[in-house]
């Protein structure tokens, strides 16, 4: 992370290296999730989003979407349902705009998981089934 910080401080904010710096936060956040250090993961991933804002990274950036995806998962594990929903919905929205079909489907599955964990089973089923109906739409987007 120190190397990434040094590179960031010595480059133009519009440089492609900024994505490497943001991805470093995402990867460290995922590692902390795997180590069950959820508060630290939340801190690192949130810092990644702050960097996106500071560096004026576009809203539809794939690096930004990954931070939202992983923050959604952290907040599910922390049982902070509203924050989880907010980040998962941002992830889905970005994926939809950048035509990342698999990400969009994964986001719906995560929303299904969120509803399952709060015992809203009918809602969970709706979100789990959403990607099943999208195949033809995705095929059209890819043409």
Image (tube, grey):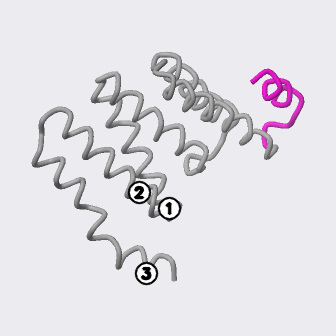
In the image: residue 16, left or right of residue 142 = right
Instruction: Return the disc, 1 or 3, that comes first in the chain's sequence.
Output: 1
Q: Which is nearer the N-term, disc 2 or disc 3?
A: 2
The one nearer the camera, 14 or 140, is 140
Q: CA distance from mark 1 to mark 3?
A: 13 Å
Q: Secondary structure at mark 3?
A: helix
Residues at discs 1 and 2 in contact (Cβ within 8 Å): yes
Residue located 29% across and 23% down the image? 79
Name which quarter of the figure residue 86 lies in: top left
Real-space Cα distance between discs 2 and 3?
15 Å
Secondary structure under tag 1 reads: loop
Q: Which mark is residue 50?
A: none
Which residue is identified by label 2?
104
Q: Residues within 10 Å of mark 1 (few under 14, many from 20)?
A: some
- Residue identified by numbered label 1: 100
Residue 138, located in which quarter of the rendered image? bottom left
Range covered by the magenta-colored residues? 1-14
Outermost front residue: 35
Q: Which residue is mark 3?
A: 140
68 versus 135 height, above or below: above
Residue 35 x, y percent position in the rendering: 51, 23
Secondary structure beneath dot 2 equals helix
């Amino acid at each position: 992370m120190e190397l990434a910080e040094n590179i960031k401080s010595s480059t133009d904010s519009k440089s492609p290296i900024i994505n490497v710096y943001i991805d470093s936060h995402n990867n460290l956040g995922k590692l902390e999730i795997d180590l069950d250090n959820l508060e630290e993961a939340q801190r690192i991933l949130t810092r990644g989003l702050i960097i996106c804002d500071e560096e004026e990274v576009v809203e539809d950036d794939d690096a930004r979407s990954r931070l939202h995806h992983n923050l959604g998962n952290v907040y599910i594990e922390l049982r902070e349902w509203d924050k989880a929903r907010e980040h998962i919905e941002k992830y889905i929205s970005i994926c939809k705009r950048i035509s990342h079909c698999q990400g969009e489907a994964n986001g719906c599955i995560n929303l299904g998981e969120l509803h399952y964990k709060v015992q809203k089973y009918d809602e969970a089923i709706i979100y789990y089934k959403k990607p099943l109906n999208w195949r033809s739409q995705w095929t059209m987007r890819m043409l």
